Amino acid sequence: MEARKIPLPARFKVKISALEADIAFCDALITFAGQIPETVYQRAEIQVYKSLETELERRLKIARQEAHERSQRLTA
């Protein structure tokens, strides 16, 4: 799925610190789930958390790029 190209209103902008916290939480959940005995549920849970973590990392990268571009425009 492609990232939106239309700028979002300020109330919808993602906070980088919130994304970083969400990624850390997913990482903790993956670590915790890995300590439970091997079950189908555990494997599914880990897969979901890894997918979520990947998506959050993608959004974080985009948010950082947008923040960098905004700062460049402000200092230009």
Image (cartoon, helix red, strand yellow):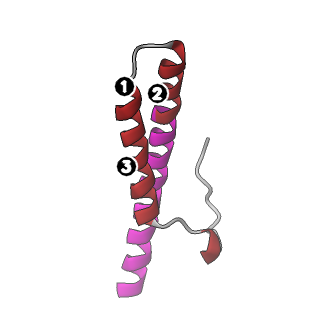
Q: Is residue 7 found left or right of 73 in the rendered image?
A: right
Please report the residue visible at 62 percent of the width from the left and 56 percent of the height from the top.
4
Q: Looking at the magenta stretch, what is its main secondary structure?
A: helix
What label does residue 46 carry, if any?
2
Question: Nearer the N terminus, badge 3 or badge 2?
Answer: 3
What label does residue 12 carry, if any?
none
- Asked if one can make out residue 74 in the rendered structure from this viewpoint, the answer is yes
Distance of label 3 from label 2 (alpha carbons):
14 Å
Q: Nearer the viewer, mark 2 or mark 1?
A: 1
Q: Residues within 10 Å of mark 2 (few under 14, many from 20)?
A: some
Please report the residue visible at 37 percent of the width from the left and 41 percent of the height from the top.
28
Distance of label 3 from label 1 (alpha carbons):
15 Å
Asked where in the image residue 10 lies, by quadrant, the reply is bottom right
Q: Secondary structure at mark 2?
A: helix
Task: Name the residue type under label 3.
Answer: Ala
Q: Are marks 2 and 1 in contact (CB under 8 Å)?
A: yes
Name the residue furthest bottom: 75
Vertical relation: 46 (above or below) 75: above
Residue 14: give x, y in percent of width and height: 53, 65
- Residue at the spot of label 3: 24
Vertical relation: 50 (above or below) 57: above
Question: How many numbered badges does the structure rendering display?
Answer: 3
Distance of label 2 from label 1 (alpha carbons):
8 Å
Question: Nearer the N terminus, badge 2 or badge 1?
Answer: 1
Residue 22: give x, y in percent of width and height: 45, 52
Task: Name the residue type under label 2.
Answer: Ile
Residue 26: give x, y in percent of width and height: 43, 42
Vertical relation: 44 (above or below) 27: above
Q: Residues within 10 Å of mark 3 (few under 14, many from 20)?
A: few
- Residue at the spot of label 1: 34
Q: Please state the extent of the stretch shown in magenta in the rendering.
A: 50-76
